[in-house]
Image (cartoon, rainbow, N blue to C red):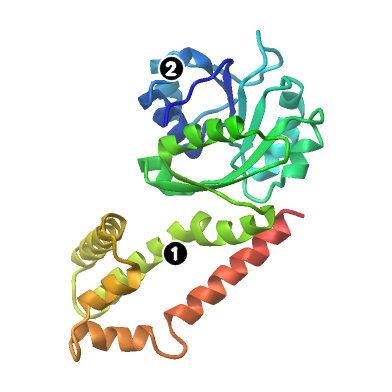
Amino acid sequence: MSLKLDGPLLIAGAGKMGGALIEGLLARGLPAHQIIIQDPAPPPEIAQFLQKHAIRTEATITSLAAPPSLILMAVKPQLMDQVFAPLAKLAGPKTVVLSIAAGKTLASFEHHLMPGIAVIRAMPNTPAQVGRGVTACVANSAASADQKAMASALLSAVGEVVWLEREDDMDAVTAVSGSGPAYVFLVAECLAEAGRKVGLSPELAQSLARATVAGAGELLHRSDLDAATLRQNVTSPGGTTAAALAVLMGQPGLQDLMTDAVAAAVRRSGELSK
């Protein structure tokens, strides 16, 4: 999906997620001169990347030659209000405000804007750094189909995009896909430690666990089969995998722990949005 902008793309925050989006957009052909970055201290590797592509970067932006087509807010949630308030004054009637900050509601951005300006709230996840993210989005009533398509085009530069009908679902999305990579990394961590405890060297156990989790994820990505079927395909009756799964799927088992973990993340996401 191509991204065509009538005005500049203003990005507040050039951290890992903002940097991943910039790299993805350039790869899709967005001219570097259309991108403007506000960040007082980008990470060194991203600062070098921005300099290489001659992307305008400033600590504070107070004026633009034309209203931005899109303002992308990619700063930490605790900094969002103080950073967005002055940038909101740069928005024109056709500007789209897109936030990727956890816990910040559509209303918290509308508060700073003229009525009728499109606001979109998005929740990406860290695999966006390698172009394999998934981002869930929800828009306010002012966002048109074309403006939502523009947001999809931007976010699809780093992975899949899905749209929600209700903002209330964002807490659950945050708990499943936003935080989800950490759960998968913990599985790899625990698998490596279990390998060490049954006699493998730490280096070998870590290498095997890393490759196994990455390979299984890629198989799941490429396969038309669901996760349950792929699991069953690995499991021979009475075999080693079945013995291990009898523990993981027992009572209480991994499903119980995951359900409780996601519920805890949902609760915390709701607390952060208040």
Q: Earlier in the sequence, mark 2 or mark 1?
A: 2
Q: Nearer the viewer, residue 196 or 26?
A: 26
Residue at point 82%, 37% (across, down): 111
Residue 250: assigned label = none
Name the quarter where the C terminus is drawn. Answer: bottom right
The answer to whether residue 38 is visible is no
Q: Position of residue 38 (x, y in %)?
A: 60, 23
Residue most extreme to the top: 65
For residue 74, side relative to residue 158 (left or right): right
Q: Is residue 27 above or below residue 155?
A: above
Q: Amino acid at mark 2?
A: Gln
> Which marked residue is nearer to the observer: mark 2 or mark 1?
1
* Residue 131 higher or lower than 197, as above or below: above
Residue holding disc 2: 51
Residue 4 showing in the rendered view: yes
Residue 106 in picture, x, y percent from top left: 72, 43
- Where residue 161 appears, as percent x and y from the top left, is 48, 45
Q: CA distance from mark 2 to mark 1?
A: 35 Å
Quadrant where the N terminus sits is top left
Q: Position of residue 236 (x, y in %)?
A: 18, 84
Q: Is residue 201 left or right of residue 127?
A: left
Q: Residues within 10 Å of mark 1 (few under 14, many from 20)?
A: some
Q: Nearer the viewer, residue 244 or 203?
A: 244
Q: Is residue 71 left or right of residue 241?
A: right
- Which residue shows up at 51% across the image and 37% down it? 152
Q: Quadrant of residue 191?
A: bottom left
Label 1 sits on residue: 183
At horizontal 72% and vertical 60% (from top left) the residue drawn is: 271
Q: Which structural element holds mark 1?
A: helix
Residue 239 is left or right of residue 34, and the answer is left
